[in-house]
Amino acid sequence: TNSQCSAVEIQELLQTSSGFMYCGIGKLFSLISPDLLTCLNLSGCSLHIISDNVVSAHALRYQTLCEEQRDKKLLSLETPLQLAGLLYLNGSVLSLLHFEQCSSDKNISFLTSLIRRTVEGDIGFGAALHATRFPSDTPPPPAQTPDRKGKAKTAGKKPEPGPDGVTAPDVTITLPDNLDPSDYNMAAFGVPHVALGEGVPAKGAK
């Protein structure tokens, strides 16, 4: 259908739900402007998953129409980083947001995998996001702090000093074999240990 949620309906969902998830074409700001988010109390809605920014011809036309009708100052707030700030200041505990454009198929498959790993593994969204990016049965090795009194390094070719006379450390970066930029499109803002579970009842409710 051609119907879609109004700004009032989105405001009601944000204020009456313990979690909010948006998976759609275009941007969330196409449906609700930043000034309508600033007046909301989101203390009861701790989790926000905004899986938007899906590219399509309809989304581009609708987004262009919305931007033409809005104030330029409000348009400067319609960025993922500004959205994360608005949600945090209004009470959000964890926000998962898209930063770049993506396809509809990739968006749905990534979000489905994220939710499935969270539920089946009974883990927080931060750990599920990492597991979705690096789907492996073996966990990554823990970070280690080098010992000041450790063994001497194997002799090798010494790095040449830079123009200022300071020798740069030898750094090796290893990237995954199947690196997909779209796997790093979603970023987490807030407490990564938030997981799916029973919502916290409102004050006075039994």
Image (cartoon, rainbow, N blue to C red):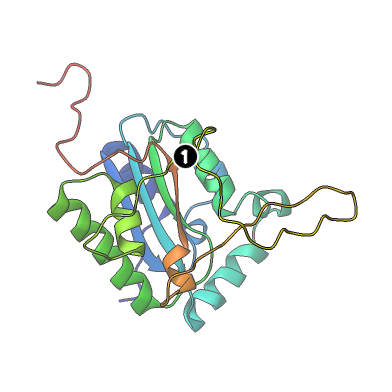
Q: Quadrant of residue 135?
A: bottom left
SS assignment at label 1: helix
Where is residue 23? Give x, y as percent: 35, 63
Q: Quadrant of residue 134?
A: bottom left
Hey, what amino acid is under mark 1?
Leu
Give the quarter of the figure containing the C terminus.
Answer: top left
62 to the left or right of 142: right
Does residue 60 appear in the picture of this structure?
yes
Above or below, comparing residue 199 to residue 163 in the picture = above
54 to the left or right of 49: right
Residue found at x 14% / y 21%:
205
The furthest residue to the left: 206
Name the one closer to the observer, 82 or 206. 82
Q: Quadrant of residue 204?
A: top left
Give the quarter of the figure containing the N terminus.
Answer: bottom left
Residue found at x 32% / y 37%:
45
Where is residue 149? Give x, y as percent: 52, 33
Name the one closer to the observer, 102 or 193. 193
Label 1, residues with CA under 10 Å away: few <14, some 14-19, many ≥20: many
Above or below, comparing residue 86 to residue 135 in the picture = above
Residue found at x 36% / y 29%:
43
Where is residue 136? Give x, y as percent: 26, 65
Where is residue 133? Give x, y as percent: 36, 63
Above or below, comparing residue 179 to residue 162 in the picture = below
Does residue 39 appear in the picture of this structure?
no
User: Dot 1 corresponds to which residue?
Assistant: 87
